[in-house]
Image (cartoon, grey):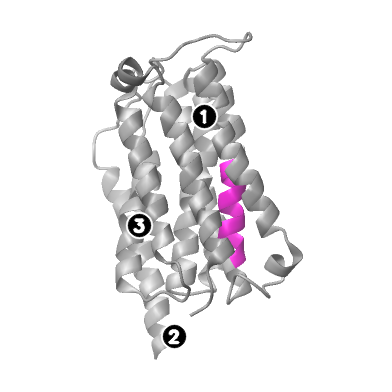
Amino acid sequence: MQEKIRQNAVLLILALFFTTTALVLFVPPVAQSLGYHNFADTTTLCGVPNFWNVVSNASFLVSGVFGLAFMLRPEVVSGSTTFANRSEWWPYFAFFLGVTATAFGSAYYHWAPDSNTLVWDRLPLAVMFMALFAAVISERIEPEAGRFMTLPLVLFGAATVVNWAVTEHLGLGDLRLYAVVQFFPIICVPVILWLFPARYTRANDLLVSIGWYALAKVFETFDLAVYEALGLSGHTIKHILCGVSAYWILRMLRHRQVI
């Protein structure tokens, strides 16, 4: 009976996700703002344009590489530690793969910001969002969901970026589907954490990680104001805080125990 309830919960969440995606299509297309690429800090150092926005992606690289190194430990891969069910390994591995790729994609974009390079920033971000969404469903609701949901969700996330890139190329840039990928998990994950009991200790670490990400988005929003106040742009600080957010996931996995 309990197994059936968990399976129905997974199906319900997926239904809400794709229903939201369908409903968003009734909203007029949302084009990329023309001023999106105009960042506050355009300092060139050592021949690197937009230096601080480029090098601050090291935060993603450190968290991603350490995360992958942890996930590839034999005892973690085999499922003898960290995960009660080996299926839960897959989404977290995809998450840290996305974090690592974001370091390169975002650095590439900030070296020469335009809509063409932005694709390589958003692709790994979509992988991160969808992989973490699958991870939470897997460890809170249905462990086997990690095995069968990770790849479809990651591919869907990537497809929304490709859709934006194609429509942008046609002069009809449309961010609606990518917005669902970015924001639906952030809204849904705390609800899942509230409704379904934790199977591991350190459950609050996930909320802390979301908090770091939310703070990063605040700094991103006030890019220029932060730059004028601190001499370091809000977007640069956003990169650092997003790396901290990813690290907090690794910190959780390293120290938690099965309840």
Instruction: Please give the name of the residue rendered at 65% of the width and 48% of the height, measured from the top-left corner.
Output: 66
Instruction: Please give the name of the residue rendered at 53% of the width and 37% of the height, measured from the top-left corner.
Output: 123
**Which residue is nearer to you in this view: 94 or 116?**
94
Q: Name the residue under label 2.
A: 3
Q: Does the magenta stretch include residue 95?
A: yes
Magenta stretch bounds: 89-100
Q: Where is residue 75 in the image (x, y as percent from the top left)?
A: 72, 69
Amino acid at pointer 2: Glu
Can the viewer see residue 207 in this picture?
Answer: yes
**Which residue is nearer to you in this view: 149 or 242?**
242
Task: Tell me which label, 1 or 3, sits earlier in the chain.
Answer: 3
> What label sits on residue 141 in the rendered view?
none
In screen coordinates, is 107 left or right of 126? right
Amino acid at pointer 1: Val
Residue at the far right in the pictured view: 74
Instruction: Please give the name of the residue rendered at 62% of the width and 56% of the height, measured from the top-left corner.
Output: 93
Quadrant holding the N terminus: bottom left
Amino acid at pointer 3: Phe
Q: Name the residue under label 3.
A: 17
Residue at the far bottom in the pictured view: 1
Q: Name the residue under label 1.
A: 119
Q: Does 255 appear above or below 249? A: below
Q: Position of residue 176 (x, y in %)?
A: 33, 38
- Image-quadrant location for residue 229: top left
Task: Tell me which label, 3 or 2, sits earlier in the chain.
Answer: 2
Q: Is mark 3 on a helix, strand or loop?
A: helix
Q: Position of residue 106 (x, y in %)?
A: 54, 29
